[in-house]
Image: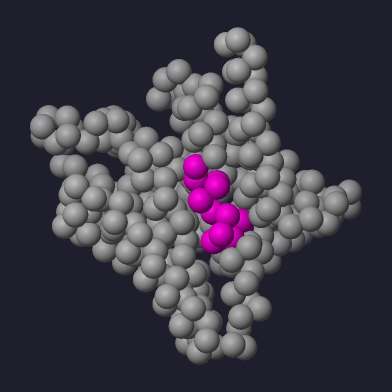
Amino acid sequence: MEIITSEFFQRALIGGVLIGITAPLMGLFLVLRRLAMIGDTLAHVSIAGVALGFLIGVYPIGVGLVFALAATFAIEKLRKAYKSYAELSIAIIMSGGVALASLLFSMGKGFNVSVSGYLFGSIYTLDDTDLLLIGIVTIIVLVAVFLHAKELFLLSFDEDAAAVSGLPTRYFNFLISILTALVISVSIKIVGALLVSALLTIPAACSLVIARSFKRSVITVVIIAELAVIGGLIIAGVWNLAPGGTIVLLLIAILLLLLSIRRKFSA
């Protein structure tokens, strides 16, 4: 149990707790808007940016963040071009992100081992710069959600009604996409690009099972994510398991438990 008191574990815990607030919070808005797969898309594009960062010797998460932000603008543009088939924008950008990442991997074979940490998560390697960036993103997300809670609520449940009422839907669509890109970019070093969408969507899925209002859903997703992050880190640290995978499997276990409880009481 001495691992819990070690400095690298404390850094991991701080980073995990911060992401446990922002990732499920943004994931709730994505799930309500039927855009759950955007997490996977931005994560894959971020990995292409991380690979480029290693290739040119620039802070990888920073380059991944730039790539994710660029992808959000591209997705919104394509959503407008294919109004009746909006999901095409996600598929197109994801394909481009995977293709670009594979190309950059082949150009820099020497850093493939380092990049793999971003694919599956390397939370124990968080440094001061990573924690600072995660902290800044957390503040930005919380301030934005607090200032625009009503607008984001309306947009999430009925975008057409929001537009008719005079809400600048384009602005808030971009806002949600940009905030999501920020969160995903700083999350990939914690749970990995291949698992980050689970931290976005599974807490939201849990809240849909037990929450009966939007306010309760917001509280529920954060509580569930924090339980999984803290519990997953402790379990992984004590039994020497992969932290990212442990966190996600714990989230799935919580979801299955909630579903079984609801089924039992509804029977």
Q: Is there any visible trace of residue 218 in the rendered image?
A: yes
Magenta highlight on residue 197 = yes
Quadrant of the rendering where the C terminus is positioned: top right
Residue at position x 35%, y 59% in the image: 91
Viewer-nearest residue: 182 or 256 = 256
Q: How many marks?
A: 0
Residue at position x 30%, y 51% in the image: 87
Would residue 156 be found to the left or right of residue 95 on screen?
Answer: left
Q: Is there any visible trace of residue 182 in the rendered image?
A: no
Snapshot quadrant of residue 144: top left
Q: Is residue 77 above or below residue 101?
A: above
Q: Which residues are magenta?
A: 190-201
Horizontal and vertical percent position of residue 159: 22, 36
Horizontal and vertical percent position of residue 5: 82, 52
Horizontal and vertical percent position of residue 111: 60, 83
Q: Is residue 63 above or below residue 122?
A: below
Viewer-nearest residue: 165 or 80 = 80
